[in-house]
Image (cartoon, grey):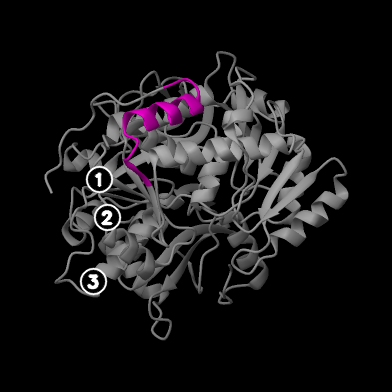
């Protein structure tokens, strides 16, 4: 398929409901979403469902300013709920499905939730029972347990469209720290983030986008917004199963795949099962973010899966979709960068001494952007996050090239200090991921009485009966050009890595479990 430059005008609006209404007028019969059960919804059908559901919740007492927390799988009904609450002006707090009782209670208490919406059960976990336990400790909290159906009523009874308060969204970081942090966002900020995606990626009405990020994550909501802005259709599933998801994407003619490095690697394995038949014949590019990737993954994706390869993006819960790559860029830019910041967004690279880094010089990424949060729910966290001029300190190490493209090189806190020497875990990971026969891998620092920390490679082999050896891994890394001083001293074989909803390895939990277990005691960690 020829890749056209579709970065022309897209619909936009300051409020999400206005965008829903505008898209329904512009392309009423266009496909918004198809799910794994092959249910379909048009843009006009979405608008109508949102209005009926908004009226249903209004009849239950939800109104402008009502704080609603919800934890629901990625389903069409969840998309409808999200925009129904937006239509009413509720303050909504989506929570990803991986969160459990402690985190759910902490979040509901901190945001002052008045209503919590959950399924009775999902993938073996009793969310309904959990919600009832949480509500027992938070007397002001009501719960709604749903099997997928949502309350509906006649839209004629809907109240007028709200004009405030401006910050109606609270997204929490993925729980990799002891207490998640809630980032407060506005409709306009989310629209700015989706604008970055649409301007740089350039989807259009003929495109089908793999929406594999959870709807409850800010990236999931932004996929819906991007579809509303561009007229593209989403392919949605509530659980990622490599073979079944690949079949769904193939049958629905996916043009933009996603969502992160582990997803791409899973699809590469599926494609190699039958090299004679393209899984995704209409593919334009894979769009990824949220995890390290080696440069070679771009070319491998291009050769094996087709299309232009990988276009990567960068963002945080606090500032989503800050930058995106373009499928029209040259191979070097696509393989090594996260693209350019979006409209109105600015990046600053700060050296350890506080000075500004030059082109190609690494430092901490500070940023300002229209999609930057207005602050944390716990405002005491803002002083450390922002400087006096409003620049947000990301904690990510990065540099800008001569084209203004951003490359992330690691995390300030993801440095292993061995014998007083700093070793970037990401640098080792970028080469480890190329070792043949690995389904998944990461690198963590473990406490060591002699050296302070030691480098530990943790891998999930494709064939558990023939796992790699430490000597074999080190030989491969040396052949890839890794400095001998950065080689792993320990190798752990596990069945699965603990990952959060966006595919990032929860390194703190992994290191803690490996430390407690002792060397050579790798085991299932999920």
**Residue 297 drawn in magenta:** no
Give the vertical position of 512 relative to 229 (above or below).
Answer: below
Label 1: which residue?
335
The reply to whether the C-beta atoms of the residues labelled 3 and 2 are less than 8 Å apart is no
- Residue 297: which numbered mark, if any? 2
Residue 100: x and y in percent read 69, 56
- Residue 108: which numbered mark, if any? none
Q: Nearest the camera: 260 or 495?
A: 260
Give the vertical position of 516 relative to 187 (above or below).
Answer: below
Tell me the quarter of the picture where residue 480 sits. bottom left
Residue 512: x and y in percent read 64, 61
For mark 3, give the secondary structure: helix
Give the vertical position of 411 relative to 191 (above or below).
Answer: below
Q: Point out the tag, 3 or 2, that comes first from the N-terminus.
A: 3
Region rendered in magenta: 13-32
Mark 3–mark 2 distance (CA, rounded to whole Å): 15 Å
Residue 504: x and y in percent read 49, 53
Q: Nearest the camera: 321 or 399?
A: 321
Sort mark 1 into few (<14), some (14-19) or many (20+) by Cα contacts within 10 Å. Answer: many
């Amino acid at each position: 398929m020829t890749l056209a430059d579709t970065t022309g005008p897209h619909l936009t609006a300051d409020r999400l409901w206005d965008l829903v209404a505008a898209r329904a007028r512009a392309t009423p019969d266009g496909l918004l979403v198809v799910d794994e059960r092959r249910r379909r919804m048009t843009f006009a059908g979405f608008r109508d469902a949102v209005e009926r559901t908004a009226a249903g919740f209004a009849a239950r007492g939800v109104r402008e300013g009502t704080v609603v927390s919800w934890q629901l799988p990625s389903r069409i009904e969840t998309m409808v709920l999200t925009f129904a609450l937006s239509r009413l002006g509720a303050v909504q707090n989506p929570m990803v499905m991986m969160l459990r009782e402690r985190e759910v209670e902490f979040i509901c208490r901190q945001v002052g939730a008045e209503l919590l919406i959950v399924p009775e059960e999902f993938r073996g976990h009793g969310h309904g029972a959990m919600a009832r336990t949480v509500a027992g400790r938070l007397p002001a909290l009501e719960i709604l347990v749903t099997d997928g159906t949502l309350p509906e009523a006649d839209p004629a009874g809907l109240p007028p469209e709200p004009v405030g308060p401006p910050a109606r969204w609270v997204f929490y970081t993925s729980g990799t720290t002891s207490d998640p942090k809630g980032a407060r966002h506005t409709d306009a900020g989310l629209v700015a983030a989706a604008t970055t995606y649409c301007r740089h990626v350039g989807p259009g009405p003929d495109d089908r986008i793999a929406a594999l990020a959870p709807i409850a994550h800010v990236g999931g909501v932004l996929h819906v917004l991007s579809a509303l802005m561009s007229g593209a259709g989403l392919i949605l599933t509530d659980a990622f199963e490599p073979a079944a998801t690949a079949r769904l994407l193939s049958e629905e003619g996916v043009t933009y795949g996603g969502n992160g490095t582990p997803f791409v690697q899973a699809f590469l394995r599926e494609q190699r099962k039958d090299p004679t038949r393209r899984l995704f014949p209409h593919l334009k590019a894979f769009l990824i973010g949220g995890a390290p990737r080696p440069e070679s993954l771009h070319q491998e994706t291009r050769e094996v899966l087709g299309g232009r390869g990988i276009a990567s993006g960068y963002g945080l819960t606090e500032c989503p979709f800050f930058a995106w790559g373009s499928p029209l860029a040259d191979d070097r830019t696509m393989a090594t960068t996260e693209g350019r910041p979006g409209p109105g967004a600015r990046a600053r690279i700060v050296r350890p001494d506080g000075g500004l880094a030059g082109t190609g010089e690494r430092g901490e990424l500070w940023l300002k952007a229209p999609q930057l949060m207005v602050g944390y729910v716990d405002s005491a966290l803002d002083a450390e996050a922002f400087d006096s001029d409003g620049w947000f300190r990301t904690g990510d190490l990065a540099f800008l090239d001569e084209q203004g493209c951003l490359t992330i090189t690691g995390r300030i806190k993801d440095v292993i200090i061995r014998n007083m020497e700093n070793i970037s875990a990401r640098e080792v990971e970028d080469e480890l991921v190329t070792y043949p026969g690995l389904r998944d891998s990461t690198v963590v620092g473990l406490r060591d009485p002699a050296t302070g920390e030691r480098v530990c490679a943790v891998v999930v082999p494709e064939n558990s009966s023939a796992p790699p050896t430490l000597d074999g891994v080190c030989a491969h890394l040396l052949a890839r050009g890794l400095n001998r001083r950065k080689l792993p001293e320990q190798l752990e074989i596990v069945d699965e890595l603990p990952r959060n909803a966006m595919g990032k390895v929860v390194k703190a939990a992994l290191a803690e479990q490996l430390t407690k277990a002792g060397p050579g005691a790798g085991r299932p960690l999920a």
